[in-house]
Image: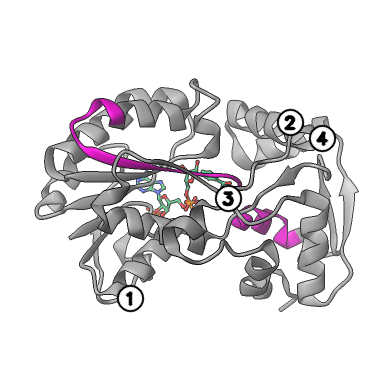
Amino acid sequence: MILVTGATGTVGRQVVTQLSELGALVRAVTRDPRSAGLPACVEAVRADLADPAPLEPHLAAVDSALLVWPFTAPGLAVGPGARLVEVLARHVSRIVYLSAEAAAGRPDSFWAAMERLIEASEVRWTFLRPTGFAANTLMWADQIRGQGVVRWPYGAAARSLIHERDIAAVAVAALTDERHAGQKYLLTGPEVITQAEQVGVIGDVVGRAMRWEELAPEEARRQLLAAWGDPAFVDSALTTWAGLVTHPEPVTGTVREITGTPARAFRQWAADHADDFRLA
Ligand SMILES: NC(=O)c1ccc[n+]([C@@H]2O[C@H](COP(=O)([O-])OP(=O)(O)OC[C@H]3O[C@@H](n4cnc5c(N)ncnc54)[C@H](OP(=O)(O)O)[C@@H]3O)[C@@H](O)[C@H]2O)c1
């Protein structure tokens, strides 16, 4: 039995699908099983990761678990995060944690805090450290469907965006194969592509001309605060994008090394999600 947290999210849903296709037994965690839209072959259980006690009865017979920590505040990783890791470590033999590339260089981040908690436990672990998700570009979908103009800061910020299917494929390998224990995998797409270029690719794929319009960082901060709430997270995103203008994200071959298939390019991701950017 494999437990998948974040099972309705970008990566978790793909992990559930790929494990089900392999015929694995999957128990999927969601706060609302009725609206989760998970495959019928999957056992969906209700739990809130902020309070792991109700999750404990669902850990019987679970061998490995994908951990998606949905909170961004580093402080939360200390209390509820520690309790969750402790509960998981009592029952499962392996945790595959969806961390981030940033965990390596930012010991103050919640990703690094969660990694430290897991490392300090008795459980075997694998850390997935992806760079930016290609799915982040869905945050521009309204602007693209509207006027076809994306107003956003740092058009020259360059990322090695990764397809969620590729992260999920590595997660499935780590959840099902002991040989990935103790590994910290830096997972990336196959190329570096700037934010302004990403908009151009989406335009190509949907067959409409798109334009990037540079937004001043102060204006972006105001808009993101209204959308995301957490000022520390907004500032950290803006600082990250600013840094990516001069220091693009790295590119690795880890997806291919682990899955045997090269990581999908951003153009492929955009084609897979073209309907999200098309006018109805
Ligand atoms: N976006 C990036 O570029 C990037 C890069 C590196 C790492 N990451 C990391 O990836 C993780 C997010 O993965 P994702 O994008 O696949 O997720 P996502 O699409 O944001 O979905 C969030 C998931 O978390 C679940 N969730 C939210 N609050 C919960 C709670 N209180 N209790 C239980 N479950 C809860 C949701 O399930 P229900 O709503 O069904 O309960 C949903 O399945 C984060 O840790 C993020 O930092 C992201």
Q: Residues within 10 Å of mark 1 (few under 14, many from 20)?
A: few
Q: In this figure, which residue is indicated by the disc labeled 2?
A: 243
Q: Are marks 2 and 3 in contact (CB under 8 Å)?
A: no
Q: Residue at x 61, y 73 (%)?
A: 272
Relative side of 63 to 266, left or right: left
Q: Are marks 4 and 3 in contact (CB under 8 Å)?
A: no
- Which x, y percent locates residue 117? 31, 27
The C terminus, quarter of image? bottom right
Q: Which tag, 2 or 1, sits closer to the chain's start?
A: 1
- The residue type indicated by label 2 comes to Gly
Instruction: Tell me if residue 129 comes above or below residue 1 in the rendering.
Output: above
Q: Is the distance from the Cβ of mark 4 to the nearest ligand 1 atom less than 8 Å?
A: no
Q: Residue at x 87, y 64 (%)?
A: 210
Q: Quadrant of residue 85?
A: top left
On residue 21, the disc is 1
- The residue type indicated by label 3 comes to Thr
- The residue type indicated by label 1 comes to Glu
Q: Are marks 2 and 1 in contact (CB under 8 Å)?
A: no
Q: Are marks 1 and 4 in contact (CB under 8 Å)?
A: no
Give the number of the mark in front: 2 or 4.
2
- Which x, y percent locates residue 193? 75, 52
Q: CA distance from mark 4 to mark 3?
A: 30 Å
Give the number of the mark in front: 2 or 3.
3
